[in-house]
Amino acid sequence: VAVESGSRPSRIATARRIATIPRVIVASPGYLSRHGAPETPDDLDRHRIIGGSAAAVPTAWRFERDGQVSAPKLEPHFSTDENEGAVAAAVAGFGITSTSGWACRRELADGTLARLLTEWSLAGIPVHAYFPMARATRAAARAVIDHLVANFERSRLPSQSDGRRTRTSD
């Protein structure tokens, strides 16, 4: 069994969506005290943007609210190939990043990162489990996937349980 997040790529395998992780826009309290918080997505073009693997997908900076869509074209001031690097840069006060709620759950919980633009919804990040295509999926693979689904449902992230909206998309 393989587990991947992001859009479901074409594969020669059977896939099952096991969760949708919320996407969040975050910055450190220090950055926000120096530069202020954006009030709308269009305000982001006046801020330092941190690019990371999670911020590079087309839906990373696409916001919706009350039927209104905003998708500002943003150029990163700092880029990294790793999502962990983008979260670390945000904690260090380099700027604002778009990432998964899962990737920065500890930082949100301990207050080293703050969520921004919470009145806007963002497309969630799908998580799929893949297993070899066969007439009958092995019972062990199905049991592992059922276990993963149950654990994702039990371990809701702070951004999933605080009433904020997250849309799902493939």
Image (tube, rainbow, N blue to C red):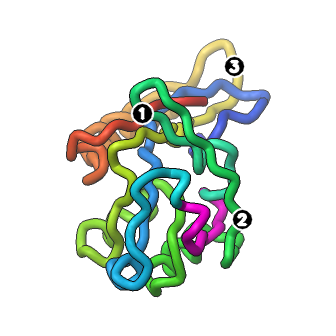
Image-quadrant location for residue 35: bottom left
| Residue located 22% across and 40% down the image | 163
Going by the numbered disc 3, the residue's amino acid type is Ala
Quadrant containing the N terminus is top right
Q: Can residue 3 be seen in this view?
A: yes
Q: Which mark is residue 134?
A: 3
Front one among 56 and 68: 68
Between the C-alphas of marks 1 and 3, the distance is 43 Å
Residue 87 in the figure: left or right of residue 55: left
Please name the residue that numbered disc 1 is placed on: 65
1 or 3: tag closer to the N-terminus: 1
The residue segment tinted magenta is: 44-54
Residue 46 painted magenta: yes
Q: In this view, does 13 lie above or below 136?
A: below
Residue ranking furthest to the top: 135
Mark 2 crowdedness (10 Å alpha carbons): few <14, some 14-19, many ≥20? few
Which is closer to the viewer, label 2 or label 3? 2
Please tell me whether mark 2 sits on a helix, a strand or a loop.
Answer: loop
Please name the residue that numbered disc 2 is placed on: 75
2 or 1: tag closer to the N-terminus: 1
At which x and y percent is residue 92? 46, 86
